[in-house]
Amino acid sequence: MRGLFVLPCVLLFSSFQIAPSNEEVSLPRVGRQEAKEVWMQTLEHYAARSDWRSLGHIAKHAISDGISLRTLMALAEKVNAEPLLRASVAAHNIRELLSGIGIEKNDLFRIALFIETELHTARDNVQNNYLSRRLTGLARTLEFDEESGKVFIHLKSHGIDEVGRGVKKVVTKSILYDVEEPKLVAHCTSSSAMKDEVAALRDMQGSKGIVKLYASGERLTKEGAPLYKMMCKLYEGGTLSSAFSNKKRFSFKEKLIIAQHLIEGLAAMHEKGLVHRDLTARNILIEKREKNDIEAVIADFGRTKPINEAQGCKVQFNSRYMAPEGIIQERLSGKDYFATDIFALGCILHRMHFEKSGPWIDKENLKNPTQPAIVKEAKFIYDLQLYREAAQPSGNSSKDRFERIILQMIHEVPANRGTTAELLANINQLLQDFEAKAASRGTEDEVVVEASPNLEVVVGNGV
């Protein structure tokens, strides 16, 4: 296992007793030459008795006084104490692999030891799988998932920046506890029920281009109000929207990979009979992996609906991503909604590649309260058609082919946008051809194709 410090595991088969006392045990300060020996004798005493609660209190002081996690690992091997070994290794690996979590080493060890030794009994005495700091006396709140057995250490409200915030959702960071490979995860909470969103997300797990879900649940707040939550993979690159705001530029290969992943994700949704209805750059998460390698996923399924329940529903709440037929939503039904998803994704890819929002968008027209909807739609279609005709590339380079795929996805005629299966086949072929050509030149890592220059096309008001 790369990058991890793991001592040989001690396998124990005896069951340990949990000390009933909540009193914190402490020792007087002694001379520095004697300190380590005193600490180790005391720790060994409690470890030999399997008195994990008292050991946790003592170890907190000992670590503050210079006893290292490696020393605790050695002690665990000496007395054949697997829980102590696992807690020491877990605390070490969390500190090594996850930076900036704001938990002191001694507090982190106590949390790990509690999870290893006391959680199984504490969880029987709580509701909603939630163990507050007040209940445990630990430095952070814990939560466990009955179905998967996963345990989470929440970092909210401890100087750790939020991941994001929406109208009804707040996303913070938590630690997915694991002795060998702990992970930072996104902890999404909402006052609105997420049952349908979770159901849709669970149905698509394992599909490329879909955010990874670790666990979900609900609990009551101190005020007695329901709070719904999901724990998902944390994508360190953030949202595509933030990348746009920060003027992040992608290599051409990265653009192709992002497009491939997102079309794969949308294809997985449509194959399940689900329509997203809120595809925006804000709901796309990215993570840089290696040079010219990136991951992109679709997130936030709060407005997702089965296609047979979507009739008459609004599409794409942000006008930057709305298809022209979305203006008169009452006419939409069934697979019409798939085409609006494809249009929205085309707008996202257009913004990424051309580095500008759609010039066909006339907000004044769309927001005019005196303008009949049918007139708004007609102008939208006219402006979009004018832009697409002027933007069509004439060559057959990789860049030209990619632009044609994007322009197809934002076609003014829904039937001409293609299906996700057709679009995915085209983008896969393009990526394969591009990689083959780059490999033949031996310069794949250096190939960066810039977006086309801004077209001198004036339509709408352009945003």
Image (cartoon, helix red, strand yellow):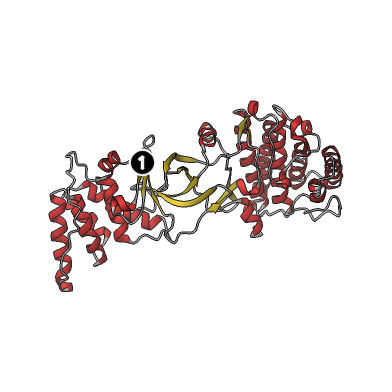
Above or below — where is 70 with respect to 178? below
Q: Position of residue 184 (x, y in %)?
A: 44, 51
Above or below — where is 202 with respect to 396? above
Above or below — where is 317 with respect to 242? above
The reply to whether residue 7 is visible in this rendering is: no
**Disc 1 crowd, CA 10 A, few/some/many (<14, 14-19, 20+):** some
Above or below — where is 353 with respect to 161? above
Query: Residue 216 or 399: which is nearer the viewer?
Result: 216
Q: Position of residue 392 (x, y in %)?
A: 83, 44
Residue that label 1 marks:
129
Per the image, label 1 sits on a secondary structure element best described as loop
So how many labels did they put on this image?
1
Query: Residue 69 occupies which quadrant of the picture?
Result: bottom left
Query: Residue 303 or 237: which is nearer the viewer?
Result: 303
Q: Position of residue 175 (x, y in %)?
A: 41, 50
Query: Residue 206 or 160: which is nearer the viewer?
Result: 160
**In the rendered view, does 188 fall on the left or right side of 434?**
left
The reply to whether residue 211 is visible in this rendering is: yes
Q: Position of residue 372 (x, y in %)?
A: 84, 40
Residue at x-position 28% and y-position 38%? 124
**In the rendered view, does 294 fall on the left or right side of 402?**
left
The C terminus - image quarter: bottom right
Q: Amino acid at mark 1?
A: Asn
**In the rendered view, does 20 fall on the left or right side of 173?**
left
**In the rendered view, does 379 fall on the left or right side of 266?**
right
Residue at x-position 74% and y-position 31%? 330
- Residue farthest to the front, as pictured: 223
